[in-house]
Each structure stands twice: as structure tokens, then as C-alpha cells.
Amino acid sequence: MERTRGGEEPRKVLDELGLKRYCCRRMILSHAELIDEVLPFG
């Protein structure tokens, strides 16, 4: 996240992390931090 905020291209960051399959890349790109919203109900 910090790298893309710094101007790096997301494709390059994912490649350097070793994420080659589109399903893994999708999971990283579409992740939303929801734990703080869900905790009150658990």
C-alpha cells in the first residue's frame, strides 16, 4: 500500500511480491479492512 501511494505501479509491486496468478492478485487488490466494523457483532 505504501509503495503504490508513493507512485509505484501496482503491477510492478505485485510482480515483485511473486504474485503471478490473477486470482491472488485480485485478492490483494480488492482487500478491504473490515475487522473493526465486524468486531462489535462478534
Image: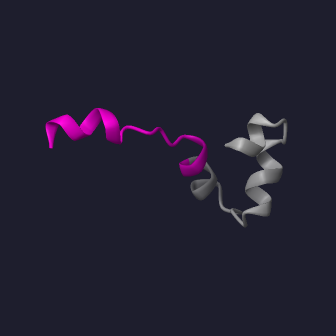
Instruction: Report the span colored magenta.
Output: 27-42
The image shows residue 25 at horizontal and vertical percentages of 63, 53
In-front residue for pair 40/13: 40
Q: Is residue 7 one of those drawn in magenta?
A: no
Q: How is the image coloured?
A: one colour
The image shows residue 28 at horizontal and vertical percentages of 58, 49
Q: Is residue 32 left or right of residue 12?
A: left
Taking the spot 64% from the left edge, 54% from the top edge, the residue there is: 22
Q: Is residue 10 left or right of residue 37?
A: right
User: Quarter of the image holding residue 35?
Assistant: top left
Q: How many marks?
A: 0
The image shows residue 30 at horizontal and vertical percentages of 54, 40
Q: Is residue 38 left or right of residue 13?
A: left
Taking the spot 57% from the left edge, 55% from the top edge, the residue there is: 23
In-front residue for pair 31/38: 38
Q: Is residue 37 one of those drawn in magenta?
A: yes
User: Quarter of the image holding residue 2?
Assistant: top right
Figure quadrant of the C terminus: top left
* Secondary structure mostly taken by the magenta-highlighted segment of the chain: helix
Taking the spot 78% from the left edge, 59% from the top edge, the residue there is: 15
In-front residue for pair 6/19: 6
Figure quadrant of the N terminus: top right
Query: With respect to residue 4, does 12 lie above or below?
Result: below
Query: With respect to residue 25, does 32 lie above or below?
Result: above
Taking the spot 72% from the left edge, 67% from the top edge, the residue there is: 18
Q: Is residue 39 left or right of residue 28?
A: left
Instruction: Single out the residue that lies furthest toward the bottom.
Output: 18
User: Quarter of the image holding residue 41?
Assistant: top left
Query: With respect to residue 24, does 42 lie above or below?
Result: above
